[in-house]
Amino acid sequence: MIDESTVRQEILKIEPYVPGKPIEDVKRELGLEKVIKLASNENPLGPAPQAIEKMKETVEQVNIYPDGNVHYLRQKLATKLGVREDELIFGNGSDELLALLGQTFITDEAEVIIAGTTFSEYRFATNIMGGKIVSVSLKDYAHDLEAMAAAITPNTKLIFICNPNNPTGTIVTEEEVKDFLTQVPDDVLVIFDEAYYEYVDHSAYPETIDYLADYENVIILRTFSKAYALAGLRIGYGIANQKLIDYIDRVRQPFNVNLMAQKAAIASLGAEDHLAKAVELNQAGKEYLYQEFDKLELDYVPTSSNFILVDLAQDSTQVFQELMKRGIIIRNMESFGYQTKIRVTVGLPEENQAFIKQLKAVLND
Ligand SMILES: *Cc1c(COP(=O)(O)O)cnc(C)c1O
């Protein structure tokens, strides 16, 4: 008989990931023609024209395995970041790198310190390996690094810091991080997930690459999914001490990063004007949404990324469903324990306007 005893017991702890609802599902289920998705922090501008061109060229070469060492992208990125090529590792999205970190470092005695309200994949990577999650509540919507440092025990193996934090959009500052790192034992790994790095406009945001020289235990994760607009291709990267990279690399599948992704990522790195445009668009969209939330007297958390956590002061599940009927998909924050909040991704100007228009209609209902 197949039942719970058939599987590794660690599996039973895993809650399925709830993604932003796909546009096609909503169209089909609700019979809608036009649907705007502001639910998954995707870049509404789309990939750089150079990346699209490169992908078209590459289509005809997909009978060939990709370069397992990601040679050309590695070269280009190492130069851009000012790190050594052997300090980089690439993944099928940074999601894969999170899983690889779990497989490389977490045993069933290991404690993993994770913020109480953050990106769910850290829990997933920990649970699947049977590690023990030590949850530390946010303070003013941001990681409480003092409390996280205080939570370290001899069993602590990893500490995840999502900076900016998803879903709150807050950062931890350079000063906080510097102080924190001095308190972490040198065999406890500190992972900075910087998926929204390119969007950050906060003057106190730490340049964590600078810490690699002094801290062998720091790992930085970034991605081409958000500001570089390649979420559908799945490519992210890690930056760390070469010894750590070497260990993680042993767990990696030989061809984990596909051909299209490698080519498009190289082209995207060269498209600095396009990236700047995406960042500007986000900035302007943020300001617009802040203004509209102010007019509606809704509280929100000022964001350093491309999404905003907003308090609707009423049941968010209901508003989420009503917005969906009106063709707007946002993220309901109920599963994060925020009963009256939503997270909305900054879209194109017309998308932001449509969202505000429908939000007003729903709130007035
Ligand atoms: C979107 C996101 C990621 C996932 O990035 P991929 O590279 O697409 O796997 C990682 N971390 C955070 C905090 C994110 O919001």
Image (cartoon, rainbow, N blue to C red):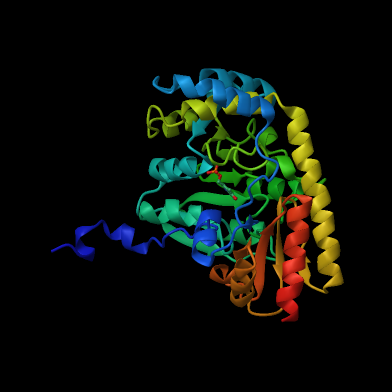
Quick check: 185 above or below 213? below
Is 282 in front, or is 30?
30
Quick check: 299 above or below 162? below
Camera sees residue 338: yes
Residue 355 in percent (x, y) is at 72, 62
Residue 151 in percent (x, y) is at 55, 60
| Residue depicted at x 54% and y 51% | 159
| Residue depicted at x 36% and y 49% | 107
Residue 129 in percent (x, y) is at 36, 51
Is 50 in front, or is 268?
50
Camera sees residue 206: no
Residue 201 in percent (x, y) is at 80, 45
Quick check: 11 above or below 277? below
Is 90 in front, or is 277?
277
104 vs 36, left or right, is left
| Residue depicted at x 75% and y 51% | 304
| Residue depicted at x 50% and y 42% | 187
> Where, quadrant-wise, is the N terminus in this rendering?
bottom left
Q: Kindly indicate the quadrant of the structure image that contains residue 248.
A: top left
> Where, quadrant-wise, is the C terminus in this rendering?
bottom right
102 vs 77, left or right, is left
Count of labels in the image: 0
Q: Kindly indicate the quadrant of the structure image that contains residue 212.
A: top right
155 vs 142, left or right, is left
Q: Kindly indicate the quadrant of the structure image that contains residue 13.
A: bottom left
109 vs 143, left or right, is left
